[in-house]
Amino acid sequence: MTRTIFVLMLAAALSACAVGPLQSSSPTQTTTAGATSGPGGGGAVISTAPSPVSGATAALLLQSQQERDAGNLGGAAATIERALSISPDDALLWVALAEIQMAQGDGALAEEMARKALTLTGPNSATATRAHRLIRN
């Protein structure tokens, strides 16, 4: 059943590629795995500011979260890197990758990626808050 839902969501997300980027009018929620989370993820739900996300990038972000939830941090990182190849200036993707790096125990790399995200987002955004949280750890 969940596989069918995932396939339908993926198909819907990919079909959005034909019409261009999405602009959400309301905040979305993303589950994050913080530094204290185990390899299986399961972190806190954090509200993120709306940002234009292509259908392919949104599908990859969802896939990465599912991989994190399943404990596949390497696969989750690789998926986010694919999304970054599509949208290299997306601060949310940089923060997501930084969170994965932190969960893998690489605080220095996580901080570097969080600082990159800060150069791409407004100082008072939810994405900036997540980046600052990673830098403090």
Image: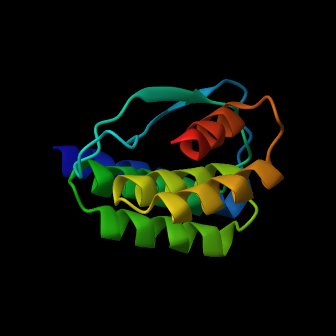
Q: How far across and how far down the image is residue 83, in percent?
A: 57, 67
User: Visible in this render: residue 14?
Assistant: no
Q: How is the image coloured?
A: rainbow
Q: How far across and how far down the image is residue 8, in percent?
A: 36, 50
Which residue occupies 51% across, 28% down?
46
The front one of 91 and 116 is 116
Q: Is residue 64 above or below residue 50?
A: below
Which residue occupies 31% across, 53% down?
68
Q: Is residue 130 left or right of residue 29?
A: right
Q: How far across and how far down the image is residue 136, in percent?
A: 58, 40
The front one of 136 and 90 is 136
Q: Quadrant of the N terminus?
A: top left
The front one of 35 and 14 is 35
Q: How far across and how far down the image is residue 40, in percent?
A: 22, 48
The front one of 133 and 16 is 133
Q: Is residue 137 left or right of residue 65?
A: right
Which residue occupies 54% across, 65% down?
109
**Number of callouts:** 0
Which residue occupies 29% across, 41% down?
37
User: Visible in this render: residue 1?
Assistant: yes
- Toward which corner of the image does residue 5 lie, by quadrant? top left
